[in-house]
Image (cartoon, rainbow, N blue to C red):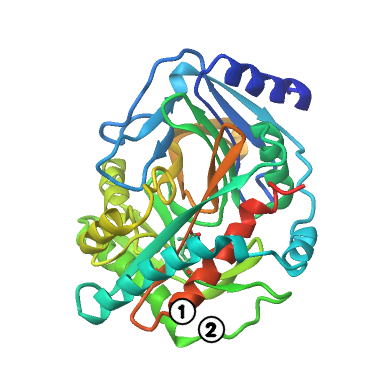
Amino acid sequence: MIEASDFYQKLKTQLKEDKPFVAYRKPGENENKVKAILQNNSECFTVKDLKESGFVFSPFNPEDLSYIIPFENSEIFELDNNSAEGIDSDLYEYLSSGTDFEYMEEDQKLHENLVQKGIDRIRAGDFKKVVLARSERVQVYDPDPIRIFKKLLNKYSQAFVYLWFHPETGCWLGATPETLLKVERNRFKTMALAGTQLFKGTEEVEWDKKEVEEQLFVTDYILQSLDEIKDIEAVNVSKPYSAKAGNLLHIKTDITGSFSGPEKMGELIKTLHPTPAVCGLPKQKALQFILENENQSREFYSGYLGELNMRSETKRSSNTRNQENQQFTSISSKTELYVNLRCMKLKEGNARIYIGGGITRDSNAADEWMETVNKSQTMKAVLVK
Ligand SMILES: C=C(O[C@@H]1C=C(C(=O)O)C=C[C@H]1O)C(=O)O
């Protein structure tokens, strides 16, 4: 088992040598492990057919290149017992201490105009939903990516927290609440996540019609897409419920099912990404609107990242009497992909934070601005002193 200081030293060396790596922790209590995948050369690997095996980093625009750190070209380290301290208490204080938004007047105007344009196009019948995003440059108090990563780990135990570096993409960090797809053997899991309000101490909250409808669009789209893929079976859908993510609450529906064989997975990923949680409905029209109208390129924000076709070994003990205590190992392939939200790109001592929100016909531009301000706190909370 590796010591924490050696673990982080390895990341530092990798950064200095300009070689690709990723460090991450999965959400949940049983996932108290920080993993690092360090590419052992400087080659640039990209994804061709999603049959590759490695850690992928995919952009929002499905036409753009997806990068991968292949497992076979890497060293993998795991750090145990990372202290996942309680989250959010100081974040909540930070939020209520009142932030000065005045300097963002220009940004606000720009974003509200964009949102209004989206609303107008929805009301004109061009599409039903579009997710519109902006980016914000934040001067960073301490620009060391490894220290920021540690802060994210401490703050957000329920998120997928990562630090990704690649010479072709630069340095990205995030703490995302959203799973794109998990696959193990022939079982898969995904989720519909949308609708946002500030967390004020309880998950027992009311949701207004606009948020409920916006989230339902996502669930319906996912179910319809699954329906269109041959050989997908036994789809289970949970009731929508409130789920906490940092200082926010979202509406979430869990969706699980199975398919005939692993070759379906690539098709499933391509159908799901980008979901209406980050793009809109119908997908192509919303995507086109985003690409033509947003005031920045999203790059990897609202793309996806995670383990693709990772071989995993499960040790099981046999209970048969005459084979007492016998263990056998079954090997399977696992995929675990997350949507790249609540993220930032670090560059020359500055962070660029990306934030967006879903727009429907009942949206209000000023409220949507506030929603992005609230969402930006997830990253800002680890950048301020
Ligand atoms: C687009 C973002 O988040 C997505 C949009 C949400 C919304 O519109 O309410 C909620 C959760 C995410 O699916 C983001 O965080 O930038």
Q: In which quadrant is the N terminus drawn?
A: top right
From this view, report whether residue 174 is shown above or below residue 45. below
The disc labelled 1 sits on which kind of residue?
Glu
Q: Is residue 305 left or right of residue 232?
A: right
Q: Is residue 366 left or right of residue 120?
A: right
Quadrant of the image occupied by residue 220? bottom left
- Write the residue at 53% across / 69% down: 371
The disc labelled 2 sits on which kind of residue?
Trp
Across and down, in percent, residue 331 comes to 46, 32
- Write the residue at 45% across / 67% down: 109
Across and down, in percent, residue 154 comes to 74, 47
Q: Are marks 1 and 2 in contact (CB under 8 Å)?
A: yes
Pick whichever, 74 or 163, lies toward us: 163
Labels in figure, total: 2
Q: Within 8 Å: ligand 1 and the Cβ of disc 1?
A: yes
Across and down, in percent, residue 213 comes to 39, 80
Quadrant of the image occupied by residue 284? bottom left
Residue under label 2: 207
Q: Residues within 10 Å of mark 1 (few under 14, many from 20)?
A: many
Q: Is residue 251 visible?
A: no
Mark on residue 211? 1
Circle 1 — which element? Answer: helix
Pick whichever, 62 or 334, lies toward us: 62
